[in-house]
Structures are given as C-alpha cells and as structure tokens.
Image (cartoon, rainbow, N blue to C red):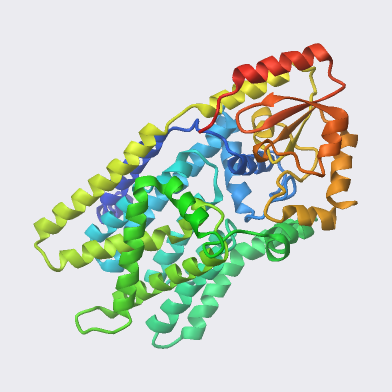
Amino acid sequence: MTSLSGVRDRLARTDPLVPLLCAVATTLYVLHGFDGYLSRDLGDYAYGGQQVAEGVPPYVAVVNRAGPLAHLIPGIGALLSGWVGVDQVVGMRVFLMLFAIAAIAVAYLLGRDVFRSRLAGVAAAASLLGCQGFIAYASDGPREKTTMVLFLLGAMLAMVHRRWLTVGFFTALATLCWQPVLFVVMAGAVTAIVLGQSEGRVKALARVVVGGLIPTAVTVACYAAVGAFDVFWDDFFLINARYTRQISLVTNPDEAWRMLVEGYGPSLALFLTGLVAITVLAVRALWPSPDRRDAVRVNVLATGAILLAGVAWSLRAFNGFPDAFIMLPPAALGIGGLVAGLAHRVSLRTAVFATAAWTVAATAIGATYAISTRDNTLDQQRASVDAVLDALPPGARILSVEAPQPLVLAHQRNLSRLQLFGNGLIDYVDDTWPGGRDGYGRWVGRQKPTLIALGNGGTVPDWLDPTLAQGYHRVGTSIGWDWYVHKGVGRQTRDELRTIVKDTYVPVE
C-alpha cells in the first residue's frame, strides 16, 4: 500500500506537459519518416554504428573526427534493431529519435525552470519542435549533433539547479559526441558558478571537473583495455588539433548563410528571433534590478555566455547548418524569455493565448516540413545496392572513397579505416600511411576490390586516378555515389551493371 501511495505521489508531481510535448514530438518525427536519403555523413555514422554492433569500438573501424559517442549511440540502435528484426538503418534512426524527443522534454523543463514559468517552457520546447534542421536529423539520422543537443540541454538544466557534478557529467557526454561543445558549456558553467555562488566557487568548479572526468575516464580506460588508445587519441584529438581545415562564418559568410537558409527554411526566423531575444535578455541582465530575481538573472547570463561561446566557435569553424545546433538551446530559451516577459505585462489569459498561438505556429511549421519532405530514398538506395551486388559473384567486395552508404546497405566492412578525406584528412593520410596519399591509392589497386564506391560528387582525387585508370571501369552514378567495377569482371556483367545503375538512379535534389 505504501509503495502504491509513493507511485501516486510521484505521478502527482509529474508535470503533465512533459508527456504531452513528447507525444507531439513523436507524432511530428514519425510523420517525417525513417526512409529519407542516406547521405555521406549520415552513412559514416551509420557505418560506425554497424561496426559497434559487431563488437568493433568507435574509431577502430573508421577514421572519424567526431566524438566516439557519434558511433557508439547509433551502435546501440543497430544492436537493438538486430534483436527485434528491424533494418539496422531504420533501427538506428528510431533509436536516435528517442534522443530528439527527450531533447524536447528537457527544453521544456529548462525554459520552465529558468524563468519559473510553464508558459516559457512550452514556448521554448515549441521553438525546438518547429526547427526544420532539428527535425531533419531527428528521424533521418544518425547524426551526432542530435544527441549533443540533448546532453547540452541536460548540462544547462543541471546548471539551473546548481548540480555541478551533473553539469560536468553531461558536459563530458556532449563533448564525447562533438568536441567543440566543451568550450561552450564550460563558458556557461563558469559564468553560473562565478555569479551564482556567493562562496564555494572552487569546490563547485571542482565538482564540474570531477563529473566530467567520470565518463571521460571510462572512455579512455576502455580504449586502453583493448589496446586502441592511440586510435582514440588520433581521432578524438590529434586530427582536430593538427589537420582539420574548415570554413567559418568569417571566411565564408555567404556560404554559411546559404547553408543556414537551406537547412532551416522558414524556421530560421524562429531561430534568429530566439537568438536576438536571449542576447537582449542577457545584456539587460548585466545590470541588476530590484524587480529581477537574482537566480533568473544568473541563469540568463549563463545562457548568454553559452551563446557567445557558440558564436565564437562558429566564427572559427562552420561546416554546415548542423553546426548551429550548438546555439539551438539558447535560441529556444530566448523565445521562452519573451513569453515570460509577456506574462508579467498582460493578463494570464492573454499570455496563455499568445503561448498557444506560438506553439501552434511553430508546430505547424515543423509539421509542414516533416510531411512535405518525407520520402523513401533510403529504399531506393538499398534496392540499387542489392541489384548491383546480385549481378556479381558472391563475395564481391566494396571499397568506399567518400561513400560509406553502400557499405552500410550491403553490411560490409571497408578494406581500410579510411573513407573520408576532406577538410584536411588527406594530410593525415600523408603523415600516417606508408607513401602518403599516393601510397594509399596504390594499396587500393593491390587489394583489387570488386567495386569502388566514389562520392565527392564524382570527382576523382588525383591519388586514386591511376588506380581507376589502370584497373577499373566506371559503370554509372547511383543515388549519392559513382560505381567503378574491376576490369576483371566480364564485359557482359559490366554492361548489366551499367543497365542496373541507370535503372536505379534517382537524382537527389
């Protein structure tokens, strides 16, 4: 009886808006579907996830400069999908969708607790719910920045409640997804500690560090235990510090703006509104006011520090619209702050109506995008790969060059850890592979893979050109990559492959 009473008490304390918002998010993401185009980057994370499901640690099967959780978390989805008999890519996408749904719930809790207002929480959650870019990867992943957003939100919520050990724990998890988030969260944490702690600041900061060391130490210990610490060091730190070359908001502002418009569509207006709002709120919070609660002021300033650090990083490196995910939580809080301010100036009925209107509008923007962009390109990609392999003898091997998707759909492991070569990775190959990039190209020729899947828009890199010219025939462009088949495959089969690839090719707009 006591146990039942305890359950009832916990249910009574549960905010009913949390499951409601989760239900709306689930509906929205399911409407978007799980069969969208598997791009190169998504294929890279899916490939890593598949290898994790087969017992290969992140980084060991493929060179990748994101954090190890970028492969480990999809790997859990791939493993679970195998247990229940679901296609692995779909299973990974469904699993990652759960993280996106949880992010909506935490966005609500964060807005509610920062501004002490459920209306602010709903407005913040609705802003993230209507974000086109976030929807794109909520059900069409896997993408490391989806999980990063959840852990970033978790760290921010822990800051609000001054749970410094938890702040460090979630900061480390977010960093193990995408490294730059470390500097962003720490900017907020230090601001919250300095301004929000009248004493014990060193102890609070130490608790953040200890909390962060827990998952970090576990990760390092696991790599050391399997003899792969050097692989972890190279992929997690060295490649990013020494080799990575990226565009930025400073060097390519027009290109960055194009990517934002393309990635966020109409929801870009929501995003920018939120960024302006939180900036104004943070500037106002710099001057204490008798009518402003100190805790709210500190939380707003901490959010402003997170935004400032996110903008600073983007000025250094901005490779695509998902890089702006790091600023989605501050933008959502900006909208929540607008609603909280409105609620203090108008009647409750008016504030509720305004919040409801905003929520409906944001959700409508998200639903319109979800329904209008739903497609089954993944099915077409899978059918294309199956048809190509069916035309070849059993045991045909694929080697990927900027095209991990065929490996994922064929459930094959690449002949080397190398698949992506852009943004400075080819320089890493020069320094680590015997003979550098040209040596790698010659090595590919000696391995004689049956098929080479070439991404990169069909552009053949100089180091691969001699191998393709001497040993391969191009048979056509599939959905996201070009196929090259070894000259040892008979002419009749090559002609059949050309027909198959032509018949299964669908342009991706």
Residue 110 visible here: no
**Residue 203 location in percent, x, y?**
51, 82
Q: Nearer the viewer, residue 422 or 410?
A: 422
Left or right, residue 414 beside residue 435:
left
Q: Quadrant of residue 428?
A: bottom right
**Residue 434 location in percent, x, y?**
90, 51
Residue 123 visible here: yes
- Going by the picture, which residue comes out furthest to the bottom? 199
Residue located at (41% from left, 77% from top): 192
Q: Is residue 117 above or below residue 280?
A: above
Left or right, residue 493 beside residue 357:
right
Left or right, residue 354 beside residue 153:
left
Q: Nearer the viewer, residue 473 or 27?
A: 473
Residue located at (68% from left, 28% from top): 410
Residue located at (90% from left, 51% from top): 435
Q: Nearer the viewer, residue 477 or 34?
A: 477
Left or right, residue 272 beside residue 349:
right
**Residue 294 location in percent, x, y?**
29, 80
